[in-house]
Image (cartoon, helix red, strand yellow):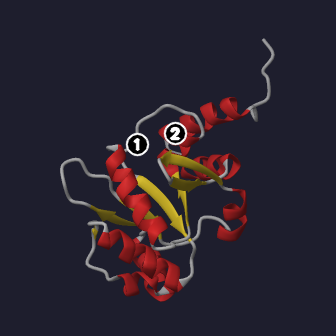
Amino acid sequence: MRLQRLETIFRALNGAGVRYIVVGGLAVIAHGLARLTKDIDVVLAFEPDNLAKGVKALEQAGLRPRIPVSAEEFAKVENREHWARDKGMVLFQMSFFERDDAPVDIFIAPPFDFEEENARAFHDEIAPDLIVPFVHIEQLIAMKKAAGRPKDLEDVRILLRLSGMQPETKP
Protein backbone atom coordinates (compact mmCIF):
# COMPACT_ATOMS: atom_id res chain seq x y z
CA MET A 1 0.00 0.00 0.00
CA ARG A 2 1.47 3.34 -1.01
CA LEU A 3 1.29 6.53 1.03
CA GLN A 4 -0.39 8.19 -1.96
CA ARG A 5 -3.37 5.81 -1.53
CA LEU A 6 -3.66 6.67 2.14
CA GLU A 7 -3.55 10.36 1.35
CA THR A 8 -6.26 10.01 -1.28
CA ILE A 9 -8.55 8.13 1.09
CA PHE A 10 -8.07 10.30 4.17
CA ARG A 11 -8.13 13.60 2.26
CA ALA A 12 -11.46 12.51 0.74
CA LEU A 13 -12.93 11.68 4.16
CA ASN A 14 -11.55 14.82 5.81
CA GLY A 15 -12.58 17.03 2.90
CA ALA A 16 -16.17 15.79 3.09
CA GLY A 17 -16.27 16.33 6.86
CA VAL A 18 -16.78 12.64 7.58
CA ARG A 19 -16.46 11.62 11.22
CA TYR A 20 -14.33 8.48 11.42
CA ILE A 21 -11.69 6.68 13.46
CA VAL A 22 -8.97 4.42 12.04
CA VAL A 23 -8.74 0.99 13.67
CA GLY A 24 -7.01 -2.27 12.69
CA GLY A 25 -3.54 -2.61 11.23
CA LEU A 26 -2.98 1.07 10.49
CA ALA A 27 -3.86 1.94 14.08
CA VAL A 28 -1.41 -0.72 15.27
CA ILE A 29 1.29 0.92 13.14
CA ALA A 30 0.33 4.39 14.42
CA HIS A 31 0.78 3.12 17.98
CA GLY A 32 4.37 2.13 17.23
CA LEU A 33 4.39 -1.45 15.98
CA ALA A 34 6.23 -1.89 12.68
CA ARG A 35 4.18 -4.35 10.66
CA LEU A 36 2.48 -4.70 7.30
CA THR A 37 -1.18 -4.22 6.56
CA LYS A 38 -3.06 -4.59 3.31
CA ASP A 39 -6.24 -2.70 4.12
CA ILE A 40 -7.60 0.33 5.93
CA ASP A 41 -10.13 -0.37 8.68
CA VAL A 42 -12.37 2.50 9.71
CA VAL A 43 -15.32 3.06 11.98
CA LEU A 44 -17.60 5.84 10.82
CA ALA A 45 -19.89 7.70 13.21
CA PHE A 46 -23.14 5.75 12.90
CA GLU A 47 -25.40 8.59 11.82
CA PRO A 48 -27.14 7.97 8.47
CA ASP A 49 -25.90 11.25 6.96
CA ASN A 50 -22.31 10.57 8.05
CA LEU A 51 -22.38 6.99 6.75
CA ALA A 52 -23.72 8.07 3.35
CA LYS A 53 -21.27 10.99 3.21
CA GLY A 54 -18.38 8.61 3.95
CA VAL A 55 -19.26 6.18 1.17
CA LYS A 56 -19.87 9.03 -1.29
CA ALA A 57 -16.52 10.66 -0.41
CA LEU A 58 -14.69 7.40 -1.05
CA GLU A 59 -16.55 6.92 -4.34
CA GLN A 60 -15.55 10.42 -5.43
CA ALA A 61 -11.94 9.48 -4.61
CA GLY A 62 -12.19 6.54 -7.02
CA LEU A 63 -13.13 3.63 -4.74
CA ARG A 64 -16.07 1.36 -5.49
CA PRO A 65 -18.07 -0.94 -3.21
CA ARG A 66 -17.27 -4.66 -3.55
CA ILE A 67 -21.03 -5.31 -3.52
CA PRO A 68 -23.48 -3.26 -5.61
CA VAL A 69 -24.82 -1.01 -2.85
CA SER A 70 -25.40 2.74 -2.97
CA ALA A 71 -24.31 5.11 -0.23
CA GLU A 72 -27.94 5.61 0.72
CA GLU A 73 -28.52 1.84 1.00
CA PHE A 74 -25.44 1.48 3.21
CA ALA A 75 -26.67 4.29 5.47
CA LYS A 76 -29.94 2.48 6.28
CA VAL A 77 -29.68 0.66 9.60
CA GLU A 78 -32.14 -2.04 8.54
CA ASN A 79 -29.92 -2.97 5.56
CA ARG A 80 -26.79 -3.22 7.69
CA GLU A 81 -28.66 -5.26 10.33
CA HIS A 82 -29.93 -7.63 7.60
CA TRP A 83 -26.42 -8.06 6.17
CA ALA A 84 -24.99 -8.79 9.62
CA ARG A 85 -27.78 -11.15 10.68
CA ASP A 86 -28.46 -13.02 7.44
CA LYS A 87 -25.13 -12.86 5.63
CA GLY A 88 -22.67 -12.73 8.52
CA MET A 89 -21.26 -9.48 7.19
CA VAL A 90 -19.07 -7.43 9.54
CA LEU A 91 -17.32 -5.08 7.12
CA PHE A 92 -18.37 -3.19 4.00
CA GLN A 93 -15.41 -3.09 1.64
CA MET A 94 -14.59 -0.44 -0.92
CA SER A 95 -11.66 -0.71 -3.30
CA PHE A 96 -9.82 0.92 -6.18
CA PHE A 97 -9.82 -2.48 -7.94
CA GLU A 98 -6.24 -1.95 -9.12
CA ARG A 99 -2.98 -3.84 -8.63
CA ASP A 100 -1.66 -1.56 -5.88
CA ASP A 101 -4.97 -1.52 -4.10
CA ALA A 102 -5.75 -0.13 -0.66
CA PRO A 103 -9.17 -1.53 0.21
CA VAL A 104 -11.15 0.29 2.86
CA ASP A 105 -13.10 -1.88 5.31
CA ILE A 106 -15.95 0.01 6.97
CA PHE A 107 -17.60 -1.53 10.02
CA ILE A 108 -21.34 -2.05 9.44
CA ALA A 109 -22.17 -2.03 13.17
CA PRO A 110 -20.54 -0.02 15.93
CA PRO A 111 -17.73 -2.00 17.58
CA PHE A 112 -17.64 0.64 20.34
CA ASP A 113 -19.32 3.85 21.47
CA PHE A 114 -18.17 6.23 18.73
CA GLU A 115 -18.50 9.43 20.75
CA GLU A 116 -16.53 8.02 23.66
CA GLU A 117 -13.74 6.71 21.44
CA ASN A 118 -13.71 9.85 19.31
CA ALA A 119 -12.99 11.84 22.47
CA ARG A 120 -10.10 9.46 23.34
CA ALA A 121 -8.70 9.10 19.80
CA PHE A 122 -5.29 10.50 19.04
CA HIS A 123 -4.69 12.49 15.90
CA ASP A 124 -1.54 12.15 13.86
CA GLU A 125 -0.28 14.03 10.82
CA ILE A 126 0.46 11.30 8.28
CA ALA A 127 1.28 13.73 5.46
CA PRO A 128 1.55 17.52 5.26
CA ASP A 129 -1.74 19.03 6.47
CA LEU A 130 -3.37 15.61 6.73
CA ILE A 131 -4.48 14.78 10.27
CA VAL A 132 -6.02 11.35 10.84
CA PRO A 133 -7.82 10.10 13.99
CA PHE A 134 -6.64 6.75 15.38
CA VAL A 135 -8.41 4.65 17.99
CA HIS A 136 -7.09 4.80 21.55
CA ILE A 137 -4.63 1.99 22.32
CA GLU A 138 -6.83 0.44 25.03
CA GLN A 139 -9.76 0.12 22.63
CA LEU A 140 -7.47 -1.17 19.89
CA ILE A 141 -6.20 -3.88 22.23
CA ALA A 142 -9.77 -4.81 23.17
CA MET A 143 -10.73 -5.08 19.49
CA LYS A 144 -7.68 -7.20 18.69
CA LYS A 145 -8.40 -9.52 21.63
CA ALA A 146 -12.02 -9.89 20.49
CA ALA A 147 -10.92 -10.76 16.93
CA GLY A 148 -8.75 -13.51 18.43
CA ARG A 149 -6.80 -14.38 15.29
CA PRO A 150 -3.16 -15.32 15.84
CA LYS A 151 -1.88 -12.12 14.20
CA ASP A 152 -4.27 -10.03 16.32
CA LEU A 153 -3.14 -11.74 19.52
CA GLU A 154 0.50 -11.13 18.55
CA ASP A 155 -0.38 -7.45 18.00
CA VAL A 156 -1.95 -7.41 21.49
CA ARG A 157 1.16 -8.90 23.07
CA ILE A 158 3.43 -6.31 21.49
CA LEU A 159 1.05 -3.37 22.00
CA LEU A 160 0.78 -4.20 25.69
CA ARG A 161 4.54 -4.21 25.98
CA LEU A 162 4.99 -0.99 23.96
CA SER A 163 2.33 0.83 25.99
CA GLY A 164 3.66 -0.30 29.35
CA MET A 165 0.28 -1.87 30.18
CA GLN A 166 1.77 -5.37 30.42
CA PRO A 167 2.83 -6.20 33.93
CA GLU A 168 6.45 -7.05 34.51
CA THR A 169 7.08 -10.79 34.63
CA LYS A 170 9.42 -12.15 37.27
CA PRO A 171 12.09 -14.65 36.20
Identify the image quadrant of the C terminus: top right
- Outermost residue toward the top? 171
Residue 62 or residue 28, whichever sits in front: 62
The residue lying at 46 percent from left, 87 percent from top is 76
- Outermost residue toward the front? 129
The residue lying at 52 percent from left, 39 percent from top is 29
Q: Residues within 10 Å of mark 1 (few under 14, many from 20)?
A: some
Residue type beneath disc 2? Ile
- The mark that comes first in sequence, 2 or 1, is 2
83 lies above or below 22: below
The residue lying at 31 percent from left, 66 percent from top is 61
**Local secondary structure at mark 1:** loop
Q: Position of residue 14 (x, y in %)?
A: 48, 66
Along the horizontal axis of the image, is 64 left or right of 144? left
Along the horizontal axis of the image, is 165 left or right of 3? right
Gap in angstroms between the C-alphas marked 2 and 1: 9 Å
Q: Position of residue 147 (x, y in %)?
A: 54, 51
Mark number, residue 60? none
Residue type beneath disc 1? Thr
Mark 1, residue position: 37
The residue lying at 32 percent from left, 65 percent from top is 94
Residue 165 or residue 116, whichever sits in front: 116
Identify the image quadrant of the N terminus: top left
Residue 57 or residue 32, whichever sits in front: 57
Query: Is residue 91 at least partly visible in the picture?
Result: no
Mark 2, residue position: 29
